[in-house]
């Protein structure tokens, strides 16, 4: 659906004239569309719409508010209908098929008329007062502005441990794809409409932002810290299905990155691939030198091994420095010698990780030692990649 397509089932929609706010200009489409997805939000939505409305007015922002509801059985719909009558810049969309938070937000993208789109929860978890700051950052040139719980100044209210762990796991997965973004699963963000226009979004589950980052058209993403407030009214709808949907979504973004071969996610995934290939080349170097020194030079095999290991660390470093992480910027990285020392230490750490997993697998879980070693290699690979990416080559574009 194009951005200008008026939604047919919208009373008080486009036909009633341009939405207007006190202080806003009289003509033209709104600059900002605020999308509020709702399901069973009768306790919050009235106050929420009024607060967003007041914030837009106070800051002289020409905006519209789109409430996208999935046929809530409670009083959410009548409450918003009444607001629609009172406030010309409020629109309600009632969905009847394919329910879901992400689907709702994407439907909102399709009918939003603003050149900037803000997404915000209905339950006051996201501070409404920050909306003007999001808009300002977009006006100043950002394509995507993300409310982050994980940058300095951000935070989380009182979450139960289980929810913290789930959230951290989801965030970690997302951060592998977008290492510069601390909260890629935030539900509080703003985008230029061009970012999502025509993007092949496959909305499912809760994490629509990850989908936007994975498939949208953007170059500049910025974050604004905020503190996630626990909802005071109603209940969260996060479930196991949501978590599975998230894993499928990460898979989909990975597939998309491989087929398109451009964009931020592709840059990271192709880097992981290069890093893995370099690791495999290191195994060949290690084996070759071990064999050569032992068989041809007649050196005691453990001495040969020490030389073999160190040589493969050096060749791995050089290949990663010039190839895996090279070619692009580097101005934010330290000197090559520093990077080498860091890589050397991380590699030794990887050795320890490998052996610890081997030991635990065999002694504690009774796994056959060669199988346990495979797990160890995998764990060491993850360790090596993640630590080197975030320490040794931190800031590589
Ligand atoms: N239309 C629609 N359809 N809206 C929904 C649905 C749905 O199926 N499920 C939830 N919503 C709405 C809620 O009414 C609320 O406005 C918002 O989406 C968030 O739902 P919550 O159930 O309150 O989510 P949460 O607090 O667990 O999760 C929040 O935190 C995540 C970060 O960890 C949300 O903000 C997520 O967007 C965010 O990713
Ligand atoms: Mn919530």
Image: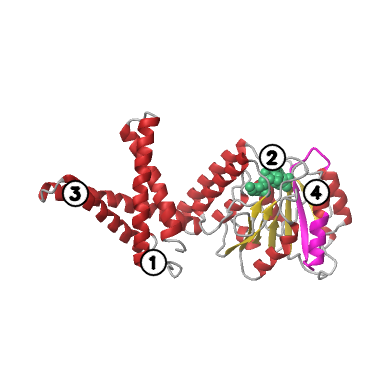
N-term-proximal mark, 4 vs 1:
4
Q: CA distance from mark 3 to mark 4?
A: 71 Å
Label 1 residue SS: loop
Magenta stretch contains residue 60: yes
Residue carrying label 1: 327
Which residue is at 61% across, 36% downward?
Answer: 240
Q: Is residue 101 visible?
A: no
Residue carrying label 4: 45
Q: Position of residue 285 (x, y in %)?
A: 24, 52
* Disc assigned to residue 303: 3
N-term-proximal mark, 3 vs 2:
2
Q: CA distance from mark 1 to mark 2?
A: 45 Å
Span highlighted in magenta in the image: 50-75
Q: Position of residue 243 (x, y in %)?
A: 59, 40
* Disc assigned to residue 367: none
Count of numbered badges drawn on the protein: 4
Dot 4 crowding, Cα within 10 Å, few <14, some 14–19, many 20+: many
Q: Position of residue 371 (x, y in %)?
A: 34, 34
N-term-proximal mark, 2 vs 4:
4
Label 2 residue SS: loop
Q: Quadrant of ligand 1?
A: top right
Q: Are marks 1 and 3 in contact (CB under 8 Å)?
A: no
Q: CA distance from mark 2 to mark 4?
A: 16 Å
Which residue is at 84% across, 70% downward?
Answer: 23
- Queried on whether the Cβ of the residue with tag 2 lies below 8 angstroms from ligand 1, the answer reads yes
Which residue is at 42% across, 68% downward?
Answer: 330
């Amino acid at each position: 659906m194009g951005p200008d397509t008026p939604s047919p089932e919208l009373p008080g929609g486009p036909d009633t004239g341009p939405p207007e706010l006190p202080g806003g200009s009289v003509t033209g489409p709104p600059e900002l569309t605020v999308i509020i997805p709702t399901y069973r939000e009768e306790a919050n939505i009235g106050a929420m719409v009024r607060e967003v409305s007041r914030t837009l007015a106070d800051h002289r922002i020409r905006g519209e508010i789109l409430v996208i509801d999935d046929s809530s059985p409670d009083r959410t719909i009548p409450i918003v209908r009444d607001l629609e009558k009172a406030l010309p810049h409020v629109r309600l969309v009632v969905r009847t098929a394919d329910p879901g938070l992400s689907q709702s937000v994407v439907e909102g993208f399709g009918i939003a008329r603003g050149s900037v789109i803000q997404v915000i929860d209905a339950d006051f978890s996201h501070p409404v007062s920050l909306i003007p700051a999001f808009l300002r950052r977009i006006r100043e040139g950002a394509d995507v502005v993300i409310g982050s719980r994980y940058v300095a100044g951000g935070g989380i209210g009182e979450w139960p441990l289980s929810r913290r762990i789930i959230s951290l796991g989801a965030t970690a997965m997302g951060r592998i794809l977008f290492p510069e973004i601390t909260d890629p699963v935030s539900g509080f963000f703003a985008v230029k409409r061009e970012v999502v226009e025509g993007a092949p979004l496959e909305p499912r589950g809760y994490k629509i932002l990850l989908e936007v980052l994975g498939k949208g058209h953007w170059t500049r993403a910025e974050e604004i810290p905020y503190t996630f407030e626990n909802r005071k009214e109603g209940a969260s709808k996060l479930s196991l299905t949501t978590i599975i949907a998230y894993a499928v979504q990460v898979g989909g973004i990975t597939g998309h990155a491989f087929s398109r071969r451009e964009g931020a996610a592709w840059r990271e995934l192709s880097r992981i691939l290069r890093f893995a290939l370099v690791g495999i080349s290191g195994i060949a170097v290690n084996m070759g030198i071990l064999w050569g020194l032992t068989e041809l030079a007649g050196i005691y095999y453990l001495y040969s091994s020490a030389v073999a290991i160190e040589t493969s660390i050096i060749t791995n470093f050089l290949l990663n420095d010039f190839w895996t992480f090279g070619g692009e910027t580097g101005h934010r990285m330290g000197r090559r010698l520093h990077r080498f020392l860091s890589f050397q230490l991380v590699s030794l750490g990887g050795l320890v990780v490998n052996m610890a997993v081997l030991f635990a697998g065999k002694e504690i879980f009774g796994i056959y030692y060669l199988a346990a070693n495979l797990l160890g290699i995998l764990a060491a690979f993850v360790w090596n990649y993640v630590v080197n990416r975030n320490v040794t080559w931190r800031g590589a574009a």
